Every structure is written in structure tokens, then in C-alpha cells.
Image (cartoon, rainbow, N blue to C red):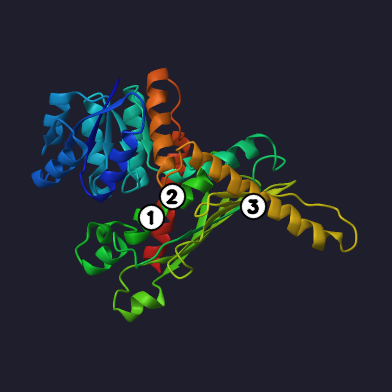
Amino acid sequence: MMKIALVGCGMVADQHMAQIRRVPGAEIVGVCDTEPLMARQLADRFHVPNRFSEVSEMLRSVRPDVVHITTPAQTHFPIGKICLDAGCHVYMEKPFAVDARQTEALLGLAESRNLKMTVGHDLQFDPESIRMRELVKGGFLGGPPVHMECMQCYSHDDPTYGKVLLGDRTHWVRSLPGSLLQNLISHGLARIAEFLPAGRPVVFAHAYSSPYLGSIGQNDVIDELRAVIYSGENTTAYFTFSTQLGAANNQLCLYGRKASLVVDSNNRMVVPIRPKGYKSYLRFFLMPLIYAGEHRRNSWHNVQQFLRQDFHMDYGKKVLMQSFYQSIQDSAPPPIPYREIRTTAWMMDDMFAQIRKT
């Protein structure tokens, strides 16, 4: 049995608790929040036997194997260090830390103590991402991606987060080095980092406030980002974060020497694009039919998963947690390599440094 504890009993904690309960062999033994009422309500709703308001006390009392940290990003480093010093493995909600320096310090401490860490980039473990990864490993692209394009969109109308942030001038997200961007873009950048060669990539970024934020007098929040990323001898990427393109636009496109892949995370679809040498006008008639077949296959794949009762919004979070726990039990590498966590942190640091100069 894997003993799990959680620090930070706010909104995202509910998602963690629900998915931990789906993982066989995982038992939630304690929750902690500096606000006792928050810890109490979470413990009561999920029937957790122990609640605490101080992390060290929780670690001494219930001795968890793994601690999930779902607090504001500014607290990730000190809480993560306390948990690692206590001999616990750590699942850190994104963003992993405030900057690359803190990221490196935590990962280095984990490695020195033979402990494991992961970060909540659960989109990489949704069904469509798993299918995409299998195709890439199987050689569908003809080698690693030569170019990538990642589109990540977000709506200020989201009542659970967007409106809360804009309605609170003291919200903790506003004090991050990258403000709103820092709390969100690691999801998209991590998907790019997975396929970048080793080493620190070169980043060129441009960011600005959308006309909507200007109309309500909130130009201090940056919500539009465009970036060009270059790594290695033949790997490039474009990254777009926007609040103006509709929250339903979240895609990753991988371009290889022989073929391409389009991954649509909102609709759980993977569309393989194979260049065909049809002569004359045949391609205009046959290719739409071929792509229609790919869409039917995606639909049938989702139906099958639903019939197996394994189709839910936070599927990727469950798979990431289960894979992380299994890596601990088997003394295997964690599901997200530390190289990818470092690369994501480097890209964010470089983007925010350029944004602050403009």
C-alpha cells in the first residue's frame, strides 16, 4: 500500500484527491493546509482520517510515502524541500517552482537522497498524447520531430479561475515572475520539451495584454504570448498562448521528415497526416475520405474507452499518478524525465526575462 498525503487544500486539491482514489493500492493518509477549515472540509468530503495545519507535523505523524503539493507556486520550493528532507517522494503541481534555479535545487536534492519527483503536466498522459507518443516511437514521423507547433488557449470567463484572478488585485498568481502566463504555460511548453534535444534551447518571445484586459483596466496582466524555440541542429518550435482564440483550441502539431501528427487535446483526437502521391485531381477526392476515416477511428477509440468506464476529464492526471507511484515501487525512472522538467523551466525563465524588458 502506498501512503499518500496532500499539502494545499484549495480548488485543485479536489482533482488530485479524486484521481488518487482511482489508483489501486494508494491510500490517502492525511491532508494539510495553513487554514484549518480548508483542511477539515477536504478531509471530511474525501473521508481522510488525518488533517493538519503544519507540514512537518503531518510528515512526523502519518509518515507518507508520497506528498502531493498543490499550494501556490511561491511555496513549492520550501515545502518541497521539507518533504524531501523527510524522505518523501514528491508530486508537485505545476508550475514546478518559481524559476529554474529552484527547479534545479529541488531535483538535485531528490537525486542526492534517491527520491523521486514529478510535476503535474498531466496533458502528456491523456489518451491522445499516449497514442501520439506510440506513433512517434514507432517511427511514423521518420525520426524525431523536425518542427513543432503548440497552441494553448484559455478563457478569462472561466468562473473557477479566470474571473477570480481578475477580480482579486492581490491574487498570488499576480506576484509570480510570469504572472498569469507562469501559472499556465508549462502545460504547453512541457509538450514541446519532450521532443527537444538535450541542452538549453534558444527562445525568442513576444508578449502583451489582450484588448479585453485593456478595456477593463488590467494591463498589468500579460495574457498573450508568441514564442520561437530553437534547439539542436534541426529542431524548432512555435508556441502560442492566447485568450483571444477560444478556449477550445489546444493542439500540438509534430512535423517529421516523412509525415506529421495533429494532436487535439480538447476533442481527444490524433490525426496522422501521410503525404500521398495521388496523380492529377485524385488527392482532392481521396484525401478528405482518408482523413474522415481517421476521425471515425478517434471517435470509436473514445467510445471504447467510455464503455470500459475509463473515460473522464482528468484521465491524464490518474495515469501520471499511477505511473509515478509505480516508478517508486519498481525503482524505475519517473514518468516525466528530469531533463524535460529542467528544459521547461529554462524556457519559462528566458521568456519571462524577455517579457520584463519590453
**Quarter containing the N terminus:** top left
Classify 10 Å Cα crowding around label 3: few (below 14), some (14-19), many (20 and above).
some
- Cα gap from disc 1 to disc 3, whole angstroms: 29 Å
Residue at the spot x=29%, y=74% of the render? Answer: 218
Residue at the spot x=21%, y=25% of the render? Answer: 86
Mark linked to residue 294: none
User: For the residue labelled by badge 1, is the local secondary structure a helix, a strand or a loop?
Assistant: helix
- Judging depth in this view, the residue of 161 and 18 nearest the camera is 18
Image-based side of 8 in relation to 255, left or right: left
The part of the image, by quadrant, that contains residue 355 is bottom left
Tell me which label, 1 or 3, sits earlier in the chain.
1
> For mark 1, what is the residue?
184
Residue at the spot x=16%, y=25% of the render? Answer: 62
> For mark 2, what is the residue?
187
- Amino acid at the residue labelled 2: His
Q: In the image, is residue 244 above or below residue 121? A: below
Classify 10 Å Cα crowding around label 1: few (below 14), some (14-19), many (20 and above).
some
